[in-house]
Image: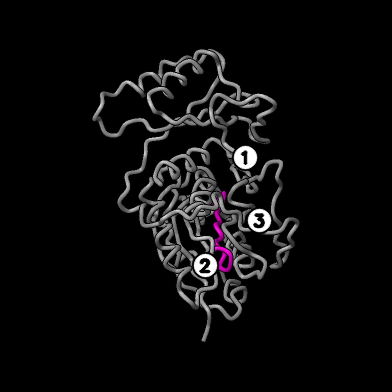
Amino acid sequence: MLRKLVFLGMGGTIAGASESATDNVGYKAGQVGVAQLLVAIPALRGALGDHEPVSEQVAQLDSKDLGHNHWRDLAQRTHHYLSVADVTAVVITHGTDTLEETAFFLSCVLPEELLRSKPVVLTCAMRPASSSAPDGPQNVLDAVATALNSASQGVVVVCAGTVHSARDVQKAHPYRVNALDSGDSGPLGFVEEGAVRWVHQCTGAIADARAFPLEKLSFVPWPWVEILVSHAGVTGTALRALCALPKGATPLLAGIVVAGTGNGTIHQDLEAALREAQKQGVRVVRSTRCCQGRVVAGSTEFEFAHSNGLSPVKARIALMLELMR
């Protein structure tokens, strides 16, 4: 009996279309279904080997427009397929804009025991499917090679021949085809002519060792957590306005992630407003707006909890899930 490799479609540029094959910017994302994308890759049959492809369209949109309901649906469908005995792995086609967030979210909520034996591989494209030189087909083939590699585990992202961990990956460039980066952690490996060359052990980084009860995504309200950026001239006005909703209003601000300057430093006016918010019960997490490195605590304790090396967008996800527990 053939084993199965599951492809879940979320839309994005990889499924985008433009009126002109030379237009790689003015396209509309999420126009081509995942089944149609797979049919358009002749080499896919050979890459699958003894695996049968199974596809499902979970969403069909520009990833900038993703909401919490899309994450819930994707997590539930991914969990469903990972739980099927003859499924080897799941490949997800996704837009690049929020790919790092979705990958990290999945790594937080999917059961570790499943991820250790069945990898989840997200892939994408920077050029639409209608392009005269689309990068999506090769990215899908590289994602398949990674998904079927015996050393793969956890949630990883494959783009432009590079394998990234869900924890470290981020979009670092708005246009070029190798738009994703893993910062100073570096990539996990590279896909070369259909074979994965690992440079770091694929540990299947799980964001939190405590298992998240996946069923909570269906009935527990998602807490309101915002991201604020510290910058020259910033004030606490916006934060005070967010905290000024009357008691009983829904939703109430539950958490703030601060993208601080440098080593997580915060402008004194914003810092004062954060203290006020914390006294009101709002959780505050400190991160950095720097694209590489992490906040280092040093010899003194920070007044606000730090993000444990997570970028602001991933720290927001971690805080939301912690509040939902």
Residue 40: which numbered mark, if any? Answer: 2
Label located before the other in sequence (2 or 1)? 2
Direction left: furthest residue: 248
Would you name the residue on which mark 3 appears? 163
**Principal secondary structure, stretch drawn in magenta:** loop
Residue 82, compared with residue 181, is above or below; it is: below
Q: Write the residue at 37% across / 56% down.
A: 73
- Horizontal and vertical percent for residue 63? 45, 47
Looking at the image, can residue 66 be seen? yes
Residue in the picture at 47% in, 47% down:
27
Q: Distance between the residues labelled 2 and 3?
A: 23 Å
Q: Does the magenta stretch include residue 116?
A: yes
Start-end of magenta stretch: 114-128
Would residue 184 be found to the left or right of residue 311 on screen? right
Give amino acid for label 3: Val
**Residue 21 in view of the camera:** no
Measured from the top left, where is residue 61 in percent x and y?
40, 50
Report helix, strand or loop for mark 2.
loop
**Residue sitting nearer the eye, 110 or 68:** 110
Q: Which of marks 2 and 1 is in front?
A: 1
**Residue 148, image x, y percentages:** 62, 70
Relative side of 295 to 6, left or right: right
Q: Earlier in the sequence, mark 2 or mark 3?
A: 2
First in residue order: circle 3 vs circle 1: 3
Q: What residue type is labelled 1?
A: Ala
Residue 125 is tagged as none
Q: Position of residue 223 (x, y in %)?
A: 37, 39
Rendered position, 142 above or below 172: below
Amino acid marked by disc 2: Ala
State the residue at coordinates (54%, 35%): 312
Please, is residue 264 above or below residue 206 in the view?
A: above
In the rendered image, which residue does mark 1 sit on?
172
